[in-house]
Image (cartoon, rainbow, N blue to C red):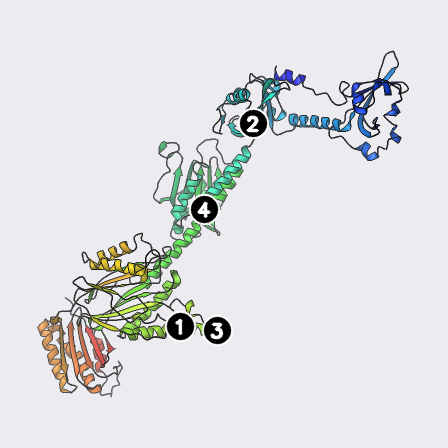
Amino acid sequence: MSAWKAAKSADFRGPLDVTRAATVVLDAQDTVIGWGPAAEDLLGYPPHEIIGKHLDTFLPPRQDSGFTAAQAAEPALGPRLSGSDIRVARHRDGHELLLATAVSPLTGSGTAAHVLVAAELEHLRLWESGLALLEGLATQSPLGLAIYDTDLRLTWCNAAYEREIGQPFAEFRGMRADELYSSGRFLTEGYPDTLDAVMHYVLDTGEPILDLHFRGEPPSEPGTDHLWSCSYYRLQDADGHVFGVCEDAFDITDRYEAQKRLALLVEAGRGIGNSLNMIVTAEEVTEVAVPGFASTVTVDLAKEVLEGEVLGTGAPGGTDLVRVASRSATANGEAGGPGESRQPSPVDYPPGSPQYRSLSSGGLVLVDDTLVVPLRAGGNMLGLVTFHRDAPSATFDSGEVALADELTTRTAVCVDNARRFTRERTSSLALQRQLLPQHLPQPSAVDLAHRYLPTDNVTGVGGDWFDVIALSGTRVGLVVGDVVGHGLQAAATMGRLRTTVRALAQLDLAPDELLKRLDDLVGQSVEDQSDAVGAAADPHMDNATGATCLYAVYDPVSRRCTMARAGHLPPAIVDPDGRLFFPDLPAGPPLGLGGLPFESRELELPVGSLVALFTDGLVEARDRDIDQGLDVLGRVLSDRRGSLEDVCDRAVSELLPDGTTADDTALLLVRTRELDAAQVAAWELPAEPVAVGHARELAIGKLHEWGLEEMSFSTELVVSELVTNAVRHADGPLLLRLIRDRTLVCEVADTGHTSPHLRHSAEDDEGGRGLFIVAQLVHRWGTRYTQSGKTIWTELAFPSA
């Protein structure tokens, strides 16, 4: 049976059709002369009880019916049947019925004058609603409906389907679906590939298939791809005979494109901005946009932006752009191949090009299949993103332009964040270079190596520090410290402490005295903060409070090392035979806490001893306690193979294998030296005037022995003046010492505690000019204090070649 024949045989008769409705035949006086079975079923009267009675028996006059005006005016659910009327009827058992009625006159001879047909109003309304539904599906529904017979030929379609084909139904009736959509394909996996195959499957199995996604070109719009959600189900009559398959299809192209755009934005949010590196960020946007949105995407940034600055104002032609990322879906000539890999390179756009126009206007430019969108953040131009499509007709619609703008805006925010980070990191590294020693002195006293690893690998700065300070008498000061916290604030505090330690060290203070003065300064800083805010300051708000420090002074003449610590870990020392020990130094409190004194300890170190000063970040970790870290460090230090640089590398690699640390880390390694006895000469002299001449003779003799006769005059003046001052102003024996190192060191020690001062003498003054003359002859000079007195020292530079 064909679908068309089945449709014709379907029961489309209404409730008031004479073949279905309750039928009553009336004569001219409205007496019932005919009563159908349906009337008996509806009103309950058998024929013998009603025939011969007046119509009023079951259908009272309207004015007596009690049917209200509102009920009479109540509309049906669908279009009203022409000629129908709404009446209240009385059932045989007495209850009332709301009926739809129609009266038709009868022609011809006989007593029958009218025929009355009646049906319950509810049934009429349901039927009218069904008609309205069928009419809506056929003429107004946006859902495309089509019926194919068992040969899969089109037998019926609604108006939406007809609009999609773009022709009157009569011109494509009887065609197969694959003939109408010859270039289409299903996107849903797990089902047959063609329309015919899908419909055959439904006809054969009776299993409906729902929501298949089909992509193709509608005949009404050749060259334009659409996407439909299609469903198929088998049609059969009441007897179970299959007469075809129904297809409903809804065009979801717009929804699908909107979902794609939303998915692209989601992917952009997930894939762009994962790095504070501008080039990586630029590469991320190309990965997101190719190939789903564009065939080729390039990102150009201004040269100033790459350096952490913003693009300056000026003519667009003067803007230096650098191509930092480029990706193509057809790289290397292979569709879908890998994206291009480029090194950043300068790029220049000629006047009139889309890119030049975008730079000039500051807005996006669309030319055929090329879309240029400026990268802007906070009103600053950062660069350009160019989207290009290869297909000649693949232009960007308004929605895609908006999507490209949104994508570029997100990228611009991430690029600007990376730019700001670059600027801040550059500033931070510059600060760090100023705070930490980049080129340590190379004193005669020790060999040096060091490592510094900040835990803040974003800014590259931290609060730990180390230092090597050249002191008088060829001695060297060794410092390592640890500031509470990380980052810029800790680094600034570290710089303040390091500068203070260097200043105090130049006073030649003993290590315990230096730490005491440093502790006093930190405590005063907290009090100053309290005065500034007008309330008691929290000592923990200052990073300097609680900082630790170790200060050591090594003398290569005596091979003695004096150490003191403020809450810091003691150093690790390995003697020339490879024996490791950690000296038992008095701990002392961390800086700024007070309450305990600082004490020094003096050690005699054999030549070639290895001393390691470090912060706890090197030996302490989340998965390792400090004792284990110290054991590892001791094992590395005891292996004396290689240079100090090699030892540094091994210590860092074994204690910090992944190169990261939970705390800032500083490591300073020194290997002790000794000045040869032939380089040092010392004499004890009485505190008498005769000692001045004797001192000059001894010094000149030693200079001749060292081959430094050229320095005799200046040295004689220096020795004469220093010994003369000691004789005049101090008691007890004097000690004259000469050291031939990188300079000629001349020292005079006495038991006094008054330091000489440089001053300008008046013309009539008898003295006071000697020290002024000394200051003009020497490279530098100063005073250091000991328990037994003081030492005035000078350094004279050797004559140049």
Residue pointed to by mark 4 = 411
Residue at the image point whose x is 11% and y is 74% from the top: 703
Residue pointed to by mark 1 = 525
Counting from the top left corner in percent of width and height, residue 556 is at: 18, 70
Q: Within 10 Å of the Cα at label 1, are there few (<14), some (14-19), or many (20+) other Cα atoms?
A: some
Residue at the image point whose x is 43% and y is 44% from the top: 271
Q: Amino acid at mark 4?
A: Thr
Counting from the top left corner in percent of width and height, residue 611 is at: 23, 64
Say which of marks 2 and 1 sits in front: 2
Residue 231 numbered tag: 2
> In terms of secondary structure, where does tag 2 sit?
strand
Q: Within 10 Å of the Cα at label 2, are there few (<14), some (14-19), or many (20+) other Cα atoms?
A: some
N-terminal-most mark, 2 or 1? 2
Give whichever of 504, 68 is nearer the camera.
Answer: 68
- In the image as oriented, which residue stretches furthest toward the right? 29
Counting from the top left corner in percent of width and height, residue 515 is at: 31, 73
Image quadrant for the N terminus?
Answer: top right
**Tag 1–tag 3 contact (CB < 8 Å):** no
Say which of marks 1 and 4 sits in front: 1
N-terminal-most mark, 1 or 4? 4
- Viewed as shown, does residue 40 lie left or right of 488? right
Q: Quadrant of residue 606?
A: bottom left
> In terms of secondary structure, where does tag 1 sit?
helix
**Tag 2–tag 4 contact (CB < 8 Å):** no
Residue pointed to by mark 3 = 535
N-terminal-most mark, 2 or 4? 2
